[in-house]
Image: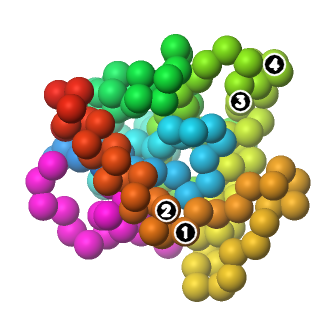
């Protein structure tokens, strides 16, 4: 992975620390999730801020999905999973609360949700929680009363990103 700036833009108001990025290209980057729905739930985003998928160039779309493919191929076996859910929420009516294109990648295994489509409700909830937690940066981060998840610490996220950088390298996907 090339030298990255200290932070990468995730929207007009949110930046991602480079220590939480585990894969990057010239146009896209992959990073760990503040409030993952499942173990290994990560995000892939274009470097250029683009609120909607249609705002991306063809080159950015191709790069974004190629990185998502590389990430999935490396992390699914790492987390002992058999499948992957890829999801994009494109616009506020789809549940997008962070106004920047990003792909949710969730390694999946049998029984991780009672009903398979419950994953989409969980992603929407995670998206909302992540946006709220990011806006409250610097304030104490409490437990999410609805589902018991709480935002991870920067140290936890840095540690997972470091481990996933090694996973990507070992899989030849770095």
Q: Which residue is mark 2?
A: 156
Q: CA distance from mark 1 to mark 3?
A: 24 Å
Q: Is residue 26 left or right of residue 92?
A: left
Res 141 seen here: yes
Q: Which residue is mark 3?
A: 119
Where, by quadrant of the figure, is residue 28 drawn?
Answer: top left
Q: Which residue is mark 1?
A: 153
Question: Are dots 1 and 2 in contact, CB under 8 Å?
Answer: yes
Q: Nearer the viewer, residue 152 or 129?
A: 152
Question: Are dots 2 and 3 in contact, CB under 8 Å?
Answer: no
How far across and how far down the image is residue 14, in percent?
48, 69
Crowding at dot 2, Cα within 10 Å, few <14 / some 14-19 / many 20+, comes out as some
Residue 162 numbered mark, or none:
none
Crowding at dot 3, Cα within 10 Å, few <14 / some 14-19 / many 20+, comes out as some
Q: Which residue is mark 4?
A: 115
Magenta segment boundaries in residue numbering: 1-21
First-in-chain label (4 vs 1): 4
Q: CA distance from mark 1 to mark 2?
A: 5 Å
Q: CA distance from mark 4 to mark 2?
A: 29 Å
């Amino acid at each position: 992975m090339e030298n990255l700036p200290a932070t990468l833009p995730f929207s007009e108001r949110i930046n991602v620390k480079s220590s939480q990025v585990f894969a990057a290209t010239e146009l896209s980057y992959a990073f760990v999730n503040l409030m993952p729905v499942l173990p290994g739930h990560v995000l892939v985003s274009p470097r250029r801020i683009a609120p909607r998928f249609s705002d991306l160039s063809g080159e950015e779309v191709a790069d974004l999905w190629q990185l998502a493919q590389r990430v999935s191929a490396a992390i699914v076996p790492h987390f002992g999973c058999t499948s992957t859910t890829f999801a994009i929420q494109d616009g506020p009516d789809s549940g997008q609360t962070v106004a920047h294109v990003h792909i949710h990648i969730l390694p999946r295994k049998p029984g991780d949700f009672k009903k398979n489509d419950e994953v989409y409700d969980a992603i929407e909830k995670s998206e909302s929680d992540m946006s709220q937690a990011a806006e409250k940066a610097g304030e104490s981060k409490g437990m999410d009363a609805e589902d018991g998840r709480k935002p991870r610490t920067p140290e936890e996220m840095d540690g997972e990103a470091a481990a996933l950088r090694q996973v990507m390298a070992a899989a030849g996907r770095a």
